[in-house]
Structures are given as C-alpha cells and as structure tokens.
Image (cartoon, helix red, strand yellow):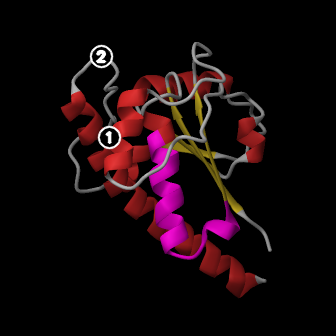
Amino acid sequence: MEKRSILFVCLGNICRSPVAEGVFRKKAQEANILDRLIVDSAGTAAWHVGKSPDERMMAAADMRGYDLSSLRARQATADDFEKFDHILAMDTDNLYSLQDISPETGKADLRLFLNYAPNRKESDVPDPYYGKVEGFNHVIDLVEEASEGLLAKIKKELSEQNISS
C-alpha cells in the first residue's frame, strides 16, 4: 500500500509547523487513515534543530488535546522535495525559502498551508513566537481549519489511489 506524505514547514519548527503536524496527525488518526500517511514538520532555519516545540505552543496544543511532546525540530532540505508529496509552508517567507532550495526534479506539491482553509482571508499563519497566548490559540484555530481541508484532499487522493490499484 502506497503512502501519502506531508511536510509542514515554518521558520524554526518550534511553533507553527509542529502544531500543524500534531493537529493533522490527530485528525488523520480520527479518520482512520494515519497508517497510510507519513507526516512530518521542519523549519527553514536551523536555529532550533533537535529542540522540542515551544513550551507555550505545547501548552496551548495540550489544552485542545494535541500532544507535541515527542516532536523535535529539524531543518528542511532539498531532499524533502523527493521524499514528500505535499510540502506546506506556514507563510509566504517560508514558501520563498522553500522555493529557493527546491530542486528541479522534486515531486512535492509546494504551497501555502492556508490554501486549504478557503474561508479564511489570511494567506499566512502568523508566527506567535513574540506574542501572547492568544496568538498561539489563533494559530491552532487556523491550523485546525486548514487541516480539515487538507484531510479532505488526502482522503480523495487515497480513494483515487485505491481505484487505480
């Protein structure tokens, strides 16, 4: 059985992308498709490689039932464009950084994560790092909404894959 692979990317991989990974994993598990997915997160910068997500984000996520404690930051690489079907940037700056490292041969579909939240006016998931707790909660709101749209797309891809198999 072929798996679908998704990589969420923000700047440091300690706030937005790990919460996107955690939220999407839980939603995929609830939809009984997590075993058919590879879900990961990364940052465009290397500042926090090997570190746990930001404590404030872990606390906000935990309040909503998302456990991020096992996640560790890593930096996105050009190889990710060969490994993943979907690479989802949290904001336009990260999208541009990813385009800069994308090889011509990459298979990944690169886009902004909030493209999957069509009812939102924002295109970027804002970085809550220098803000207050409300910012972390707002990020989770955005991530939950975009995760629903992404989940619908992935479920469709998997069902089409079953038909063609």
Residue assigned mark 1 = 60
Q: Is residue 11 above or below residue 91?
A: above
| Image position, residue 59 (x, y; %) | 36, 38
Where disc 2 sits, the SS reads loop
Answer left or right for 120 relative to 22: left
Q: Which mark is residue 130?
A: 2
For this view, does 28 lie left or right of residue 114?
Answer: right
- The residue located at (56%, 29%) in the rendering is 52
Count of marks placed on residues? 2
Residue 71's image quarter? top right
Q: Is residue 52 visible?
A: yes
Q: Amino acid at mark 1?
A: Ala
| Crowding near the residue tagged with mark 1, few <14, some 14–19, many ≥20 C-alpha atoms within 10 Å | many
Identify residue type, mark 2. Tyr
* Residue 12 x %, y %: 52, 22
**Badge 2 density bin: few <14, some 14–19, many ≥20, Cα 10 Å:** few
Judging depth in this view, the residue of 111 and 84 nearest the camera is 84
| Image spot of residue 45 (x, y percent) | 58, 17
